[in-house]
Amino acid sequence: MKVNFNQDNNLRDNEIKVEVSANQLSQPVIDLINNINSNNSFSKTLPISIGDSTRMIQFADIIAIEVLKNNLTIHTFSQEFEIKGQLKSILLKLPENDFVQVSKSAVINLDCDWCQPRCENVVFCRLKNAVFYR
């Protein structure tokens, strides 16, 4: 099996196209395609560019995202990532049912262990330097 990467500037930032090529359609090829389709972990990750590489951050690991001017800080359980960008661009890449913008400069993950529903339409989220209510 060979795996190749081809850059396609026609794809959107968070779009990935996978193409499988083989001499013939066989059971191993069908199994591979089914495995890719069923275990699509890319739909559960946020791709971010750091230097010359791209990191895939699991949505479940993200606690909050803050912005200061054009600098975004992505807070995860294990570390923080600082990247250039706009909060509105990141919001488009996040599942809207799990992430909510709590202020002009912050987004929190409602599905994270640190955020707990308190009563109807109110969420309490304890972060390292702040507490958010929504």
Image (cartoon, grey):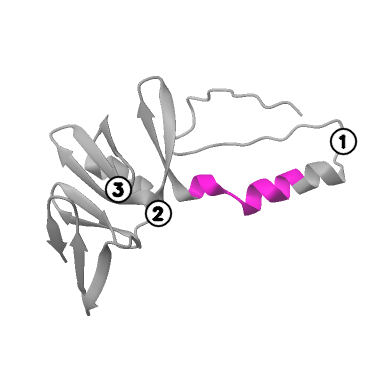
Name the foreground residue: 54 vs 89. Answer: 54
Q: Nearer the viewer, mark 3 or mark 2?
A: 2
Pointer 2 residue: 60
Image point 23% across, 52% down: which residue? 107
**Amino acid type of the residue tagged 1 in the rendering:** Gln
Whether 93 is drawn above or below 110: the answer is above
Percent x, y of residue 106: 18, 49
For numbered disc 3, what is the local secondary structure? helix
Q: Which mark is residue 91?
A: 3
Callout 1 environment at 10 Å: few (<14), some (14 to 19), or many (20+)?
A: few
| C-alpha gap between disc 3 and disc 2 | 15 Å
Percent x, y of residue 68: 13, 37
Image point 53% across, 23% down: which residue? 7
Q: Nearer the viewer, mark 2 or mark 1?
A: 2
Pointer 1 residue: 24
Percent x, y of residue 65: 24, 46
Q: Which residues are magenta?
A: 32-43
| C-alpha gap between disc 2 and disc 1 | 38 Å
